[in-house]
Image (cartoon, rainbow, N blue to C red):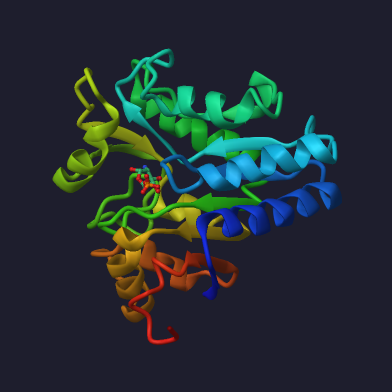
Amino acid sequence: MKIEILSSPEEIGIKLARKLYRRIMLQPKLVVGLATGSTPLPFYSALVSLVSKKPLDLSRITTFNLDEYYPIGRSNCNSYYFFMNKYLFKLLKLNDTQVNLLSGEAKDYHTECKNYEGRIKVVGGIDWQLLGIGVNGHIGFNEPGSEFNSLTRRVRLSGSTIEMNRRFFSNDKIPFYALTMGLKTILSAKDIHLIATGENKSRIVRKLILTKPSKKLPASILKLHHNVTIWLDNASAKLLEVN
Ligand code: GLP
């Protein structure tokens, strides 16, 4: 794993947005894996501002999001569908046909997850995957204990994730389940970028760097991949020896 430590989330956002911008210039049909949560927001806003200054043809990229609550309506402002449209897809004018999200409205979640895996295969896999990390080490919604060979599936959210994410659901009840790409699905991406920012991620970042791959810390599977960059700010890196 390559580790990049920059001074702030905004600096990470700008650097990573430039990287993705260049990749799309070289590979206009890039398949991009996207993440939600507060962490990727500076990256999304840097990407939107870069594209507005230096127009880029995005009409041939395809995107796949990591996860979605289940069940949840797409018009619910807490759904990841709503989030992605608000912070990225509408601003980049991406077409509905080029973006893929697991549907929290699907009646048959088995088929929904199986089809999602199929759609990723059809486009030749994910070229460039963005990840955040939960304070318990989850990636996507792969909670501690998730199998390293897991595929896209429905999962029950852990108590700590429900507690962490409840703050977004002001009047609504937070769903107990989610649909998520599996750890094997994520590991199949060719180039992976995980962002962890803020002091509240410093403990899990230290653990991730120090421990061997283990089901107890789902993000540790990334140690088995040859092309992963971990992007940290000073606050999330504060418990690392290098500082
Ligand atoms: C959420 C998402 C993850 C995200 C994580 C961290 O539960 N499912 O994909 O990485 O939690 O969220 P945040 O960036 O808000 O800390």
In this picture, is 42 found above or below 106?
below
Quadrant in which the C terminus is drawn = bottom left
Foreground residue among 161 and 112: 161
Residue at 60% over, 53% down: 13
Specify whether residue 123 is in view. Answer: no
Foreground residue among 53 and 112: 53
Foreground residue among 225 and 204: 204
- The answer to which quarter of the image holds residue 173 is top left
Residue at 22% over, 18% down: 171
Spot the residue most to the bottom.
Answer: 241
Which x, y percent locates residue 53?
81, 39
In this picture, is 12 found above or below 62?
below
In this picture, is 32 found above or below 19?
above
Which x, y percent locates residue 194?
50, 59
In this picture, is 190 found above or below 52?
below
- The answer to which quarter of the image holds residue 124 is top right
Which x, y percent locates residue 49?
71, 39
Which x, y percent locates residue 33?
57, 44
Residue at 43% over, 26% down: 112
Left or right: 154 with respect to 46? left
Specify whether residue 37 is in view. Answer: yes
Q: How many labels does the image show?
A: 0
